[in-house]
Image (spheres, grey):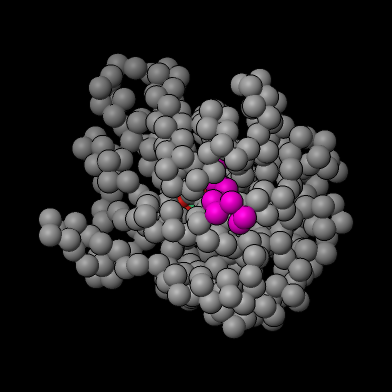
Amino acid sequence: MVNYKELGLVNSRELFKKAIKGQYAIPAFNFNDMEQLQAIIQACVEESSPVILQVSSGARKYANQTLLRYMAQGAVEYAKELGKNIPVVLHLDHGDTFELCKSCIEYGFSSVMIDGSHHSYNENVELTRKVVEYAHKYDVTVEGELGVLAGIEDDVVAEHHTYTQPEEVEDFVSKTGVDSLAISIGTSHGANKFKPDQCTRDAGGALLPPPLRFDILEEVERRIPGFPIVLHGASSVPAKYVDIINRNGGKLKDAIGIPEEQLRRAAQSAVCKINIDSDGRLAMTAAIRQTFGEHPEWFDPRQYLGPAREWLKELYKHKVVGVLGSAGKA
Ligand code: G3H
Ligand code: 13P
Ligand code: ZN
């Protein structure tokens, strides 16, 4: 057992308190490899932003649990070396069992999500309560979820979303003791967040997604004032990356994300953690495809992973400065 405090990590409690008060959101960037981690830390140090390093169970299998623990510790030390001791959280994304959450806590995670949203309400309460009871012994913070997002949640694929029912939130929060709550207000995972027939079109023919259900968010805030709310599925799917990918041999069809102005509005509410994975995947893939197109003779991974890391860094800086408002809050 290694406690996250020994690794220089922090849990999310204080970060969320400050974010709600200061009307901004902490970025939760998913990572699987060294270049993504370097880009996240470089961007957040340069913009002086607190950061949540987010690891899915698939990422944990891909990277290896032991390596991840040292990577997270390395990230804290790397930030200091770059000149800023920013708060770093290591968070399990979409944990689906008590055993997985327990194992992550034993390997140095400072925060875990137990996603019981696919179970019945009572089973979700029971599972979440059990994880909270264990996690709090080690001062690890816990995120729960109410409502189902459409798209892919790790191994679970939901065809349709079910919006969070605000009348459940007080009961859920008080029975489980969770530290934060992910809600479903119309975001979804992946790069195809809406089907074309769910969208309207602007004058130029571009798809316009349906607006997020801010009415549900406001009702949740009214019922549990000041309680930290989390938005999953919050990538914007920038057209510039999709175009570069498709111009360089990719085949992404009907890619569409959440408009940035809606995320800016959410970040100023009780939403204090915003999850971004797909945009990083798109930036990285766009950089690599473009580099391969321009330099078919290159075969040293540093020649294409280096640009990918730069594009990621630029993306993350844009998120913390221009969307989430967390720049300068470390
Ligand atoms: O919410 C899901 C995240 O984007 C993680 O995706 O399970 O493919 O690593 P993954
Ligand atoms: P995106 O697919 O929109 O990036 O969402 C990521 C996420 O919610 C991770 O939990
Ligand atoms: Zn998610």
Where does residue 124 sit, x and y in percent of width and height? 67, 74
* Quadrant (top left, top right, bottom left, bottom right) of the N terminus: top right
Q: Relative to residue 106, is residue 233 depicted above or below?
A: below
User: In the rendered image, which quarter is residue 205 located in?
Assistant: bottom left
Q: Relative to residue 330, is residue 189 depicted above or below?
A: below
- In this view of the protein, which residue sits in the foreground, 49 or 158? 49
User: In the rendered image, which quarter is residue 102 located in?
Assistant: bottom right
* Quadrant (top left, top right, bottom left, bottom right) of the C terminus: top right
Where does residue 247 sit, x and y in percent of width and height? 21, 37
- Specify whether 30 is left or right of 109: left
Residue 76 colored magenta?
no
- In this view of the protein, which residue sits in the foreground, 127 or 175? 175
- In this view of the protein, which residue sits in the foreground, 289 or 166? 166
Magenta stretch in the rendered image: 20-31
Q: Residue at x 62, y 81 (%)?
A: 168
- In this view of the protein, which residue sits in the foreground, 200 or 15? 15
Asked whether the viewer can see residue 111, the reply is no
Where does residue 185 sit, x and y in percent of width and height? 46, 69
Q: Residue at x 59, y 51 (%)?
A: 22
Asked whether the viewer can see residue 212, the reply is yes
Where does residue 49 sit, x and y in percent of width and height? 58, 38
User: In the rendered image, which quarter is residue 289 located in?
Assistant: top left
Picture mark count: 0
Residue 22 colored magenta?
yes
Q: Residue at x 72, y 50 (%)?
A: 14
Q: Residue at x 12, y 60 (%)?
A: 203
- Specify whether 119 is left or right of 3: left
- Specify whether 155 is left or right of 258: right
